[in-house]
């Protein structure tokens, strides 16, 4: 495997933390959501299992925190079978290079996301001009340059299967990024949604800090394709998930999830799409 891997040139620590930082939630017997500053990662597999997967890789500089949480759940010598990425934005790959170098394990992502993970293409710059709260205003500070995982990253199987997660299927849910995916387990209607939608108003600093819950669209300052993002939410709502873990804020389940996601799907333009912004204006 290629050992010449690195973060993008604008990689740096982001001093943003919510009250949920460092808290883990047992969502299902084999699904554990863990908050790294303002973003969630997911461990699959029951405690002390040797067969588990890490989904997403947290904020820049968070490798030690992630390793500590993982060892607490799975044991001192624990090593995941793979890392699955919902997408490659900075807050989902923040510890990825460190973790890959530590474990030497494969990373899987949608083929459309690979250019952003192999140093070939940068994401569109975040939009601080977009209508929104304080986090949107400071989003110009957020990294957008591609990381380079070299030969460690592989495309997900085209048939929708997920390596080492036999009961899950991945589905393409673009809009927030070109190769964004979500993971769904039909047997218990468990959804791992990434940032296709979130359960907090992500542009509001107060709501991010307090983890005040509401089903909302993807983070507005990093979403360049709102028409496609809407179709992805409609697709996920049609699955009628019973529990959902999103990239930001607490997991949701039951009636709160069902009603919130259905409302978002039906009123996406009013709830999720900002009135103005660099990427909004391009689509009008």
Image: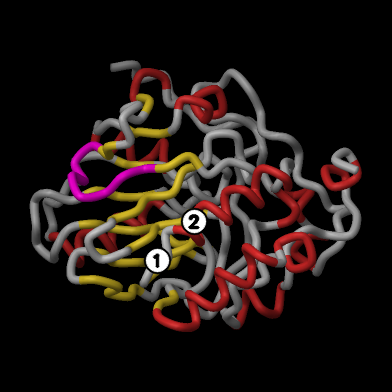
Q: Residue at x 56, y 28 (%)?
A: 116
Say if the magenta span includes residue 167.
yes
Question: In the image, 106: left or right of 95?
Answer: left
- Range of residues picked out in magenta: 163-170
Q: Please tell me whether residue 55 belongs to the stretch shown in magenta.
A: no
Prevailing secondary structure class for the magenta stretch in the rendered image: strand
Task: Answer few, some or many: residues within 10 Å of disc 2's Cα (few below 14, many 20 plus, some between 14 and 19).
Answer: many
Along the line of sight, which residue is nearer the eye, 65 or 253?
A: 253
Which element is circle 2 on?
helix
| Image vertical order of residue 161 relative to residue 137, above or below | above
Q: Secondary structure at mark 1?
A: loop
- Is mark 2 in CB contact (under 8 Å) with mark 1? yes
Q: Residue at x 61, y 40 (%)?
A: 177
User: In which quarter of the view is residue 162 placed?
Assistant: top left
- For the residue pair 33 and 269, the one nearer the viewer reads as 269
> What residue do we see at 53% from left, 65% from top?
248
87 to the left or right of 225: left
Tell me, what colour scheme is on the image?
secondary structure
Quarter of the C terminus within the rendering: top right
Residue 192 position within the rendered picture, expressed as x and y whole percent measured from the top left:
40, 57
Position in image of residue 37 (x %, y %): 52, 66
Vertical relation: 4 (above or below) 131: above
Label 2 to label 1: alpha-carbon separation: 8 Å
Q: Which mark is residue 241?
A: 1
Across and down, in percent, residue 205 comes to 71, 73
**Residue 43: x %, y % from top left:** 28, 58
Which label's residue is closer to the chain start, 2 or 1? 2
In the rendered view, tell whether residue 253 sits above or below residue 160: below
Q: Quadrant of the N terminus?
A: top left
- Drawn side of residue 71 relative to residue 66, left or right: left
Q: Identify the residue position indicated by label 2 in the image.
A: 236
């Amino acid at each position: 495997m290629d050992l010449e891997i690195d973060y993008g040139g604008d990689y740096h620590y982001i001093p943003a933390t919510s009250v949920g930082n460092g808290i883990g939630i047992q969502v299902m017997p084999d699904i554990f959501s863990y908050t790294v500053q303002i973003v969630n990662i997911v461990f699959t597999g029951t405690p002390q299992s040797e067969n588990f997967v890490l989904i997403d890789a947290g904020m820049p500089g968070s490798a030690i925190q992630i390793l500590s949480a993982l060892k607490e759940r799975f044991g001192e010598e624990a090593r995941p079978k793979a890392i699955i990425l919902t997408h490659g934005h900075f807050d989902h790959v923040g510890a990825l290079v460190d973790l890959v170098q530590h474990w030497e394990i494969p990373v899987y992502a949608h083929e459309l996301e690979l250019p952003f993970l192999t140093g070939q293409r940068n994401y569109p710059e975040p939009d601080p001009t977009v209508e929104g709260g304080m986090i949107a205003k400071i989003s110009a500070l957020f990294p957008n340059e591609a990381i380079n995982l070299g030969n460690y990253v592989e495309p997900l199987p085209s048939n929708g299967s997920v390596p080492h997660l036999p009961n899950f299927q991945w589905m393409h849910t673009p809009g927030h990024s070109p190769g964004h995916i979500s993971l769904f387990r039909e047997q218990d209607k468990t959804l791992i949604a990434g940032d296709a939608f979130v359960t907090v108003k992500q542009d509001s600093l107060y709501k991010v800090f307090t983890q005040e819950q509401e089903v909302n669209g993807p983070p507005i300052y990093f979403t360049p394709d709102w028409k496609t993002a809407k179709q992805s939410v409609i697709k996920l709502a049609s699955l009628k998930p019973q529990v959902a873990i999103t990239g930001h804020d607490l997991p949701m389940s039951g009636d709160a999830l069902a009603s919130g996601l259905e409302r978002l799907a039906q009123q996406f333009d009013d709830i999720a799409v900002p009135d103005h912004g660099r990427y909004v204006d391009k689509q009008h």
